[in-house]
Image: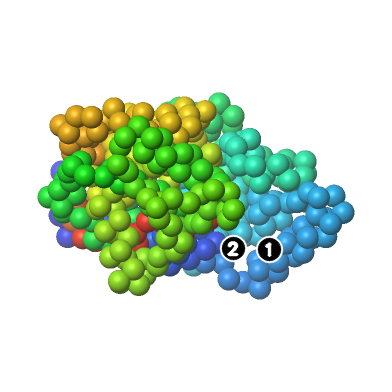
Amino acid sequence: MSAVQSPSTKKRLRIGFVHRFDARKIRSWSGIFYFMSRALEAHVGEVVYLGPDDSFGTKFTIDNTARVNRYWQRLTVKILATDKNRILSNRLGRFFERRIRQMPCDILFAPVASVEIAHLKTDLPVVYYSDITWAQIVDYYPEFTSVSEYGMAEGERIEASAITRANAAVYPSEWAVNSACDDYGASRDTTCKVSFGANLNDPPTRALALNRSIDGPVKLLLVGVDWVRKGGAIAFECLTALLEAGVDAHLTILGCTPPAGEGFEHPKFRVIPFLSKHDPEQRKQIEQLFLDAHFMLLPTRADATPIVISEASAFGLPTMATDTGGLGGSITEGVNGYLLPYEARGKDYADKIRSVVSESRRYQALVVSSRDEYEQRLNWDSWAISMRAVMERVLHREIYPGHAVKSVGSIDESTQTVTDSPDVADSLTAEVSRT
């Protein structure tokens, strides 16, 4: 009989982080890469950073594509190709093949890296993570209507190759999961949902988050950098509808400015164009806005999975949002907010808010369940524990994370309960700086 291997002699899993950008930088993908890598380090294994690719050849390829696009747009008013093209994908594939030879890994983790893995030749298992598929992007975001048929076809090839190449495909919403399976033939056995966490280094304590009272004015908060796409006009309509119904209310917009001369002015409407989460004093102002508000408003016109919902839940702040895109992956109806139809206008949001605040106990219960949703699901520790289960299935073995952590028996994230972690990155409200 062989001796049982002691924990001290077990080897930690080496996870190759695949992306052409530097995952260690807080600004990469609005800080999401940074939080993901730290959480994987804490709960799964050693993260091996295979990027960034700062080579002259890759930079030349990207810059040359941009130059060709500018010329093509002048001729046709169309974008010839996006970054999802075979030239860039082949080059990145060769780059990461070299990096894998130089820095051996056990498994590859490739978040929003369809271009990087579509032509990657390796025997290592690949776990792909994204919040949207190409099929959803082209039908959803208006700016993609200007992409040429060639560019559309290239994007489709890259997406299909990446999903086919992956041993597991993971998304933060059923919306994206369904597209991967229905549009690209991904197997339901290897495709699953694991929600985003909140980009908070120092989340509020539970006591602080739950210290809310609906007495006094109802304070609404909208966070985002695009007034039109985030539904700023609908949020303003919500404010005026509440006031007309006799409800004292205030609306604060953080991150964008309404168009001038279109009537978006009111004594109880405040606009904060920008606050830097990297400046300690401005960071405190952002946190205070979350603590003071009663509802996060997000009547967005198009979104995959906004991180701001997870962050609002950490503050016990319920979210009123549009039932569109992947928002249903972060909002559990009646638990940490409500989803309204795409056609809903400000009065509809106001009516829903009035129904919640009409009973203080109902509102307080929503605050508590919002915080519960963060502690149980919408945090990066829970995300990493679920990702460990995904990787265990891919590798067909148990993963030793290197220290004692809560064991998880399945990928079902609804069963996870993890308390606040001090070992996460320094970022607050990715939506403030996310384009």
Residue designated by label 1 = 62
Q: Determine which residue is flagged by label 2.
A: 95
Residue drawn at the location 23% of the way across and 29% of the way down: 358
Image coordinates for residue 73, horizontal then vertical, percent: 80, 54
Residue 141, x across and y down, in percent: 61, 42
Q: Nearer the viewer, residue 382 or 277?
A: 277
The CA distance from mark 1 to mark 2 is 15 Å
Q: Position of residue 254 (x, y in %)?
A: 42, 56
Give amino acid for label 1. Ile
Helix, strand or loop at label 2? It is: helix
Q: Is residue 154 visible?
A: yes
Q: Nearer the viewer, residue 277 or 133?
A: 277
- Tell me the mark number nearer the camera, choosing from 1 and 2: 1
414 in relation to 98, above or below: above
Q: Are marks 1 and 2 in contact (CB under 8 Å)?
A: no
Tell me if residue 389 comes above or below residue 308 in the rendering: above
Q: Position of residue 336 (x, y in %)?
A: 28, 36
Q: Residue at x 25, y 49 (%)?
A: 315
Of callouts 1 and 2, which one flags the residue occurring earlier in the amino acid sequence? 1
Quarter-wise, where is residue 164 in the image?
top right
Instruction: Decide if residue 42 is on the left or right side of residue 173.
Output: left
Left or right, 346 with respect to 158, comes to left
> What amino acid type should be assigned to the residue bearing mark 2?
Phe
Q: Dot 2: few (<14), some (14–19), or many (≥20) neighbours within 10 Å?
A: many
